[in-house]
Amino acid sequence: MIEVEGLTRRFHDRELGTITAVDHVSFRAGPGEIVGLLGPNGAGKTTTMRMLATLIVPDEGTARVNGHDVRLDAAEVRRSIGYLSASTGLYGRLTAREVLEYVARLQGCADAAGRADALVARFEIERFAHVTCDRLSTGMKQKVNIARALVHDPPVLIFDEPTSGLDVLVAQQLFTVLEEARAAGKCVLYSTHIMGEAERLCSRVVVIHGGRVRAETSLDELRSRAPDGRLETAFIDLVAGSSA
């Protein structure tokens, strides 16, 4: 449901010149699986996900999400995905419930009010449902954002380091939501640099560093590359080797 071929994105800086943030990246993610996009900060994970979410346009390469080309069918891609990042914003003057109903209407949900109420209950935010978003805690804002990403029940979820700044309880709730999405046959692309999250959620991983894919493999195969059998050791060795 996500097909990426040779995806490339460059940025131009007055002092540094041309920077290739994503360099001919290719990978696949299918229905009913959570694929981890692993890499250190600055590896190119966020730029890759933003291209898949049609927030920025690739310079080269192609990508299809749920059968739709990110260049040619951007509107259909957006209808097909739930996108979440640590920097996803909310409308501060709207209440949590108002945000959910508003997004549900934008996404064409037949019963936007009912869908908003269902998500308020699902994420246990009844107590804060009528509080404006600019007054919510960081964890509660992220709960609303998770619900917002799911409001139209999309077949593809693209979550970019979503646990950044979250407490343990909210993070555990997020993991449960993603596991349920996988069981329902959805395609989930999940970026992180935290190996424990990858081990809990992912069956396959794409390791990216310096804008390039360094490995696309199962967790078991990646662990087997480390002398101590630990995912973290294998990841460090792979990234360090690609920097040499």
Image (spheres, rainbow, N blue to C red):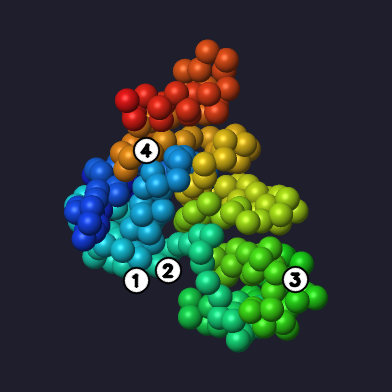
Residue wearing tag 1: 75
* Residue at point 56%, 80% (across, down): 91
Give the residue type at disc 1. Ala
Q: Is residue 75 visible?
A: yes
Of residue 116 and residue 44, the one placed in the foreground of this image is 44
- Tell me if 71 is positioned left or right of 160 in this view: left
Farthest residue, direction top = 227
Q: First in sequence, mark 2 or 3: give its number.
A: 2
Judged from this view, the residue extending furthest toward the right is 127
Mark seen at residue 65? none
Residue 220 showing in the rendered view: no
SS category of the residue bearing label 4: strand
Q: Nearer the viewer, mark 1 or mark 4?
A: 4
Q: Residue furthest bottom?
A: 93
Measure the C-alpha gap from mark 1 to mark 2.
6 Å
Amino acid bearing label 3: Ile
Q: Which label number is shown at residue 79?
A: 2
